[in-house]
Amino acid sequence: MKSFKGSLISLTGVLGQPIVNQNGQPIGQLTDLVFRWDNHENYPPLTGLIVKVAGRQVWIGAANLAKLKVDKVELNNAKLDLRDFRPRSGEVRLAQEVLDHQLIDVDGARVVRASDLYLSVVSDEVRLVGLDVGYRALLRRIGPRGWIKPSPDVVIDWATIQSFGGQGGQDTKHDLKLSAKRQELRRMRPGELADLLEDLGRDERQELLNSLSAELAADALEEMEPEELEAILRESTPSEIGQYLSKMEPDEAADALRDVDPDLREDLLKNMSENSVAHVAEVLSHDESTAGGFMNTSLLIAKSSETAADVRQNLKAAQAELGNIDAVVVTDQKGKFIYDLPLVDLLLAEPGDKLNKLVKLPAPVTAGTQANIKQVAELLVESRRSSLVVLDEKERPIGRILADDVVDALLPDYGRFHFPRLWT
């Protein structure tokens, strides 16, 4: 904000000020300022003024503005075409749709509310350049005009702000979306996006979710508190949530579905991909306090006769689907579990080495579907492994439990915890 120091114009300071024409004759009172919202500029430009004239809300284009002052607004001509104001797509009214509404400070990874908005003249154009979220701005609004001056030191640069636009009130349904700066949100970590989703109102968080890729939205939902996630499941359409759930880890998706009523659960399952439903249904078939109930069913399984080169290729192809894994499950020709091959061993092996050649002692740790959380935790501690394989009654691998899955299960109120992975 240093480049605008000394030139800030407070939105709340000019609202309600008289509008005078070129001859100094009053023609009305300023009620709002309209800015263009559908471009890629960091500082949106003014497109017009909304003026109250004889009880009507009329539109005056920005080209007619001469000066924007704290005590009055001057126009550059005496003859105006005063038309009734009509909202237009791609534009937003600052006082009605942005002031006091939820915004995202991307740099601070937080949800804020604008107590005041600041304008500045840049290259002969009035542009929105910042906002204030402090109590001084509120005091300035309720006190005498000019009582507390805007301070550039506490103003947040608008270039770091993500606004939703069209956030309520009459005649605001003109399909405004997240601005072009949504790309900045995609660079945020899933945990940061989860915090934003938990703090936003219903309409705003739906817009934020819709702006993200299905994969990133799923990652963010996995990080949310259960009660907040359940609220989103109820607010969104089954097709939207089905898409997100299909991208989530099966154990995380199962946790989300356990917390909703059976009818909604069935509806959501119908909207998930067929492959995802199969994985999630396996987890849901077990009690959530058992290994089968909190395992991750996404596995990379290879036959003992396959070569290291073949498995590496399969691992590369399945990386996006499998997410973070630390080992490859090795089975015999009938699918019976033989070994849990650490990725480091696979990567260090010669390309032509068959997997049965890479089997080592001690034998890997496994758990049955009915093992409880304490038993799983003890197995991981004793073996000093970061994960173990879950086997069914025929000793076939059906899932994997990671160390952070155990932490989540033991400390459900602590929040999601994730250990670093060797493979990302």
Image (cartoon, grey):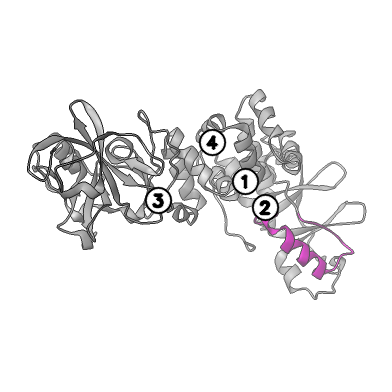
| Mark 1 residue type | Val
Q: Is residue 238 magenta?
A: no
- Dot 3 corresponds to which residue? 109
Label 3 to label 2: alpha-carbon separation: 35 Å
Q: Nearer the viewer, residue 97 or 410?
A: 97
Closest to the camera, between mark 3 and mark 2, is 3
Q: Nearer the viewer, residue 367 or 35?
A: 35
- Dot 2 corresponds to which residue? 380
| Mark 3 residue type | Ala
The x and y percentages for residue 34 are 29, 42
- Dot 4 corresponds to which residue? 229
Q: Badge 1 local density, few (<14 within 10 Å), some, or many (20+)?
A: many
Please, what secondary structure does the residue beneath circle 4 have?
helix
The answer to which of marks 4 and 2 sits earlier in the sequence is: 4
The answer to which of marks 4 and 1 sits earlier in the sequence is: 4
Q: Is there a contact, CB below 8 Å, between mark 1 and mark 2?
A: yes
Is residue 190 found left or right of 54 in the rendered image?
right
Please, what secondary structure does the residue beneath circle 2 have?
helix
Closest to the camera, between mark 4 and mark 1, is 4
Q: Residue at x 20, y 31 (%)?
A: 52
State which quadrant residue 254 falls in: top right
Label 1 to label 3: alpha-carbon separation: 28 Å
The x and y percentages for residue 160 are 35, 55
| Mark 2 residue type | Leu
- Dot 1 corresponds to which residue? 406
- Which stretch appears magenta? 300-324
Q: Which mark is residue 272?
A: none
